[in-house]
Image (spheres, helix red, strand yellow):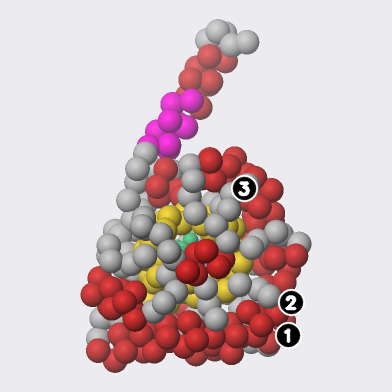
């Protein structure tokens, strides 16, 4: 399996592949396809739990889905998202919550939506043996503050702030960085500046890897963000199977 150290060293020719999963059968498919990193994202809120945002997602929910994924994955690195306000307010509580995702749920690492409030926390978690993936650019847990899901880092000041936070999180010991929905040139320059791998989503093709939400990739989501892409049409397959079952029962051909 790719270890945190292998991913951190990034000594590979091909871009890193990361994809979310929230349940055991999907995680097994993702793992068997040879995806490097399986992310149990707090996108579980939108993708699976019927919420409009990731804000209401709880640690118990992420822990439960992480357990399902970790039990199904043999090779990939399993990273669990820390949900909104499960970190950052109190250091002790943040450590306890990250520890639950590792010790109870079986994740190999945690991801935190990063900011000035996560530099010291990242250092502390890494010091304790909990690998941390940082996340900058669009950070959807801040939707109420930002007011939407618009591209970030579009002004010189905003770009400089993201660059600065990226460097600070690398120095704090993060083993990789997700950059979401920022201009391609900003993502490329941060990728150049950092030693740790940068994994992009809506950040162009010059990062060290890519991540998407699995329900978008499968074509199961009702709507896909402009920067994502569907590589299948699982929704249509499911609709057809359910309709075929209904018809078979109604017309007596099953059982
Ligand atoms: O929750 C999630 O799926 C994520 C990825 C989009 C990076 O954070
Ligand atoms: Na997330």
Which residue has dot 1 on it?
92
Q: Main secondary structure of the magenta part?
A: helix
Q: Give residue 73's mark.
A: 3
CA gap between label 2 and label 1 equals 6 Å
Q: Which residues are magenta?
A: 233-241
Dot in front, 3 or 2: 3
Asked if residue 240 lies in the magenta stretch, the reply is: yes
Q: Quadrant of residue 194?
A: bottom left
Q: Residues within 10 Å of mark 3 (few under 14, many from 20)?
A: many
Q: Quadrant of the C terminus?
A: top right
* Mark 3: secondary structure: loop
Nearer-the-camera pick, 183 or 240:
183
> At which x and y percent is residue 157?
29, 91
Q: Is residue 126 left or right of residue 140?
A: right
Q: Is residue 50 among the parts visible in the rendering?
A: no
Residue 4 is drawn in which quadrant? bottom right
Q: Name the mark on residue 96.
A: 2
- Marks 3/2: CA–CA distance: 24 Å
Residue 21 in the magenta stretch? The answer is no
Choose the circle earlier in sequence order: 3 or 2.
3
Residue name at image x 51 percent, y 27 percent: 242
Alpha carbon separation for disc pair 1 and 3: 30 Å
């Amino acid at each position: 399996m790719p270890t945190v150290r292998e991913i951190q060293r990034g000594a590979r020719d091909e871009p890193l592949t990361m994809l979310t999963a929230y349940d055991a059968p999907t995680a097994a498919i993702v793992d068997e396809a040879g995806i490097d990193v399986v992310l149990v994202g707090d996108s579980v809120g939108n993708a699976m739990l019927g919420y409009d945002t990731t804000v209401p997602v709880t640690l118990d929910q992420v822990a439960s889905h992480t357990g399902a994924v970790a039990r199904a994955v043999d090779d990939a690195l399993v990273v669990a998202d820390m949900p909104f306000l499960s970190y950052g307010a109190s250091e002790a509580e943040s450590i306890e919550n990250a520890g639950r995702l590792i010790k109870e749920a079986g994740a190999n690492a945690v991801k935190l939506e990063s900011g000035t409030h996560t530099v010291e926390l990242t250092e502390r978690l890494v010091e304790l043996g909990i690998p941390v993936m940082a996340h900058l650019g669009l950070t959807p847990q801040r939707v109420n503050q930002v007011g939407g899901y618009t591209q970030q880092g579009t002004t010189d000041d905003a770009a400089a702030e993201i660059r600065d936070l990226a460097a600070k999180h690398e120095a704090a010991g993060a083993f990789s960085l997700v950059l979401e929905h920022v201009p391609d040139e900003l993502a490329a320059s941060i990728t150049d500046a950092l030693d740790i791998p940068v994994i992009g989503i809506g950040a162009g093709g010059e990062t060290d890897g890519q991540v998407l939400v699995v329900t978008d990739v499968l074509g199961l989501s009702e709507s896909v963000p402009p920067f994502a892409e569907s590589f299948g049409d699982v929704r249509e397959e499911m609709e057809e199977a359910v309709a075929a079952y209904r018809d078979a029962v109604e017309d007596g051909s099953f059982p």
